[in-house]
């Protein structure tokens, strides 16, 4: 039931007690504002971390050769280790390997041309399963396949930005031939990558073809192994196992830190996820703390307000106010103030997040701070309800007290 | 109008108890102007509070306007207070953040009278009390006499049967006290029953009947005609 007279009475009281209203409202608005900003920033952090990993698999080891730093079995330090196809064959049979591939950069030439257009790009010779390492999305045609490898085909898959650089007219690239070092490669696919733009300035060709046409023998650069069901601890053991195997094959000291370099994405991802879980927990604890202190603040103010109004309540009762009308007057006032202030805090908090998200230059590990609206609304509701309860108990008490006691001079 | 039979009231504070009213028998007729006198602690304010249902009695019968007042719910008490009784207090008990007109109009708010109507009515009563030009002032901008007149206007606006005044002149100088008593007499002339608690003889002397309380009992009741005699005996003592 909407009682306009009662609301007039409430607005009258509010407008004549501005400081009291302001204090109550501020503590609610501040609590909500802080919560929104805090949770939003936490979410921004989460988004940022996720973005860093986007586009790459998080279950692979990437093995690169280096230069020995220790003398071993009569060989001097400073010897360059060169991986061959054999090394790949040796490593792909490891336990729990789900996919494996190699990646070899073509240094001989990095210029690609199509008609009058040309550009320099990163050209990698790979195996088809490389797609499980780099999250490439084929937007046209297909990725390299085993047939390309087996038949030494001159096939090429190009990144979206390569396509845009060479095929200015926007024509269909599939089936067209591009030139690398005077050799024609047939475009079989164009890919996109949700990660950085740098990944889109790439072209992939089959490793078998590359080794033959660029006179690379059996050389490869990097071996990539995807694993299934391997945690951080186990990945550490696998890294050691790989080092031992390669040390035996290439005759270097297994303790040599510089002979091979292994990028362990499994361990890294887990580290980040653990870190992130920690941060999230931390933010929730602070958020809960903020809400609790807000509740305490509102409760405190409501209790003082009721205490302060005891005499007024006594007067109103002497003039014919029922306990119900007293309680509902105080409660409606408190709910009105806390709800309005909570809303203001919510709007300001969300506004700040939007502003940050629009104007903040893109940072590593921080992107698109935002807040789950349900969480924000529930928090606001919680504050309103707790303010009402905190006001109800003393209001109820004050309203049931005999007016003679309420009217008594202090 | 008001009938009290063997009213008892005891206050308990911790382990000590204080028997404030020890069997009060009293009848006040409609239209009377009565004062209750007594030294402090004699129970005169307690008696007034019980009559005004601001407090309840422990035992005895209390009838107001032929209705027995017993085990009253707060809601019912509020209804009776609003309908039958107007209060005037020593410390005025005005709501400090409401202006004069809003204070006077408040009893009508609890009668659910629409805002415009109750403000209009409040203005009429303020005019009667000579406070029309102060209608939009807050209580603390008024003098003691003005505050009490404001409180009287508030007590009158609900057209009560009884006005209960607890030391209405206690906080006022003698000149203003006389002025306030004059107002009470005017109200009395319009047929409203008035009960004034006071310890000032000059105030009591203006009433038709003086009820003297001592230690929770009625010591004496002095009727209008005997007033002069009583005054003289007081002077001789």
Image (cartoon, rainbow, N blue to C red):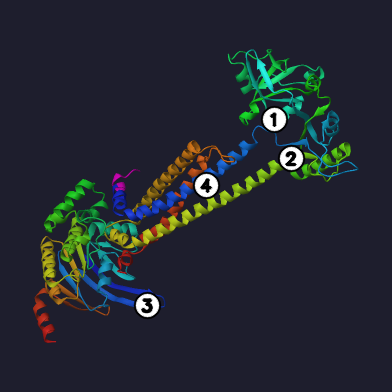
Residue at the outermost bottom position: B237
Q: Are marks 2 and 4 on the same chain?
A: yes
**Circle 4 residue:** A38
Residue A343 lies, in percent from the top left, at: 42, 44
Q: CA distance from mark 1 to mark 2?
A: 14 Å
**Circle 1 residue:** A134
Q: CA distance from mark 2 to mark 4?
A: 32 Å
| Residue in the image at 63% along x and 45% along y | A276
User: Of the numbered discs in the image, which one, if any, rests on residue A264?
Assistant: 2
- Disc 4 is placed on an element classified as helix
* Tag nearer the camera, 2 or 4: 2
- Of marks 1 and 2, which one's residue comes earlier in the chain? 1
Q: Residues within 10 Å of mark 1 (few under 14, many from 20)?
A: some
Q: CA distance from mark 4 to mark 1?
A: 34 Å
Q: Are marks 3 and 1 on the same chain?
A: no
- Of marks 2 and 4, which one's residue comes earlier in the chain? 4
């Amino acid at each position: 039931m909407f009682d306009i007279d009662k609301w007039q009475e409430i607005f009258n009281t509010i407008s004549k007690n501005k400081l009291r209203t302001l204090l109550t409202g501020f503590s609610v608005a501040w609590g909500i504002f802080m919560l929104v900003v805090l949770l939003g920033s936490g979410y921004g952090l989460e988004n940022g971390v996720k973005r860093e990993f986007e586009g790459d698999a998080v279950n692979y080891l990437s093995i690169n050769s280096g230069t020995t730093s220790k003398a071993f079995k009569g060989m001097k330090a400073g010897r360059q280790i060169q991986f061959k196809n054999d090394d790949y064959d040796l490593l792909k049979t490891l336990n729990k390997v789900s996919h494996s591939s190699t990646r070899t950069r073509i240094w001989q030439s990095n210029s690609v041309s199509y008609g009058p257009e040309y550009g320099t790009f990163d050209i990698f010779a790979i195996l088809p399963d490389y797609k499980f390492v780099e999250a490439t999305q084929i937007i046209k045609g297909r990725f390299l396949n085993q047939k390309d490898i087996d038949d030494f085909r001159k096939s090429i898959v190009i990144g979206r930005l390569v396509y845009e650089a060479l095929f200015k007219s926007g024509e269909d690239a599939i089936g067209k031939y591009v030139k690398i070092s005077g050799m024609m490669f047939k475009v079989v696919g164009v890919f996109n990558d949700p990660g950085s733009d740098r990944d889109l300035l790439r072209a992939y060709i089959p490793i078998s073809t590359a080794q033959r046409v660029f006179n690379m023998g059996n050389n490869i650069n990097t071996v990539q192994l995807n694993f299934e069901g391997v945690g951080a601890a186990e990945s550490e053991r696998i890294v050691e196992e790989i080092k031992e195997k390669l040390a035996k094959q290439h005759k270097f000291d297994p303790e040599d830190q510089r002979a091979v370099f292994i990028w362990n994405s499994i361990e890294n991802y887990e580290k980040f996820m653990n870190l992130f879980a920690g941060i999230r927990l931390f933010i929730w604890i602070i958020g809960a703390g903020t809400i609790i202190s807000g509740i305490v603040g509102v409760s405190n103010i409501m209790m003082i307000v009721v205490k302060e109004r005891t005499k007024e309540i006594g007067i109103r009762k002497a003039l014919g106010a029922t306990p119900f009308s007293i309680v509902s007057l105080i409660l409606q006032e408190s709910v009105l103030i806390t709800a309005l202030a909570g809303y203001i805090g919510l709007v300001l908090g969300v506004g700040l997040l939007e502003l940050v998200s629009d104007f903040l230059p893109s940072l590593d590990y921080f992107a698109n701070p935002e807040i789950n609206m349900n969480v924000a609304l529930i928090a606001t509701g919680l504050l309103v309800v707790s303010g009402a309860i905190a006001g109800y108990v003393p209001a109820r008490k004050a309203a049931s007290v005999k007016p003679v006691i309420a009217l008594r001079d202090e | 109008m008001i009938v009290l039979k063997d009213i008892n009231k005891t206050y308990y504070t911790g382990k000590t108890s204080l028997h404030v009213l020890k069997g009060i028998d009293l009848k006040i007729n409609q239209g009377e102007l009565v004062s209750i006198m007594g030294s402090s602690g004699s129970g005169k304010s307690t008696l007034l509070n019980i009559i005004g249902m601001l407090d309840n009695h422990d035992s005895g019968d209390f009838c107001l306007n032929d209705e027995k007042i017993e085990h009253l719910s707060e809601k019912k008490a509020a209804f009776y207070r609003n309908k039958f009784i107007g209060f005037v207090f020593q410390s005025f008990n005005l709501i400090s953040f409401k202006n004069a007109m809003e204070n006077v109009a408040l009893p009508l708010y609890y009668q659910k009278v629409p805002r415009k109507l109750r403000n209009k009515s409040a203005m009429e009563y303020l005019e009667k009390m000579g406070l029309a030009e102060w209608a939009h002032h807050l209580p603390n901008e008024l003098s003691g006499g003005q505050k009490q007149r404001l409180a009287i206007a508030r007590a009158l606006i609900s057209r009560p049967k009884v006005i209960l005044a607890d030391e209405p002149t206690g906080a006022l100088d003698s000149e203003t006290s006389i002025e306030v008593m004059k107002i009470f007499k005017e109200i009395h002339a319009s047929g409203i029953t008035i009960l004034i608690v006071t310890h000032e003889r000059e105030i009591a002397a203006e009433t038709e009947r003086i009820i003297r309380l001592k230690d929770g009992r009625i010591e004496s009741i002095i009727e209008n005609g005997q007033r002069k005699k009583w005054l003289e005996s007081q002077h001789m003592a």
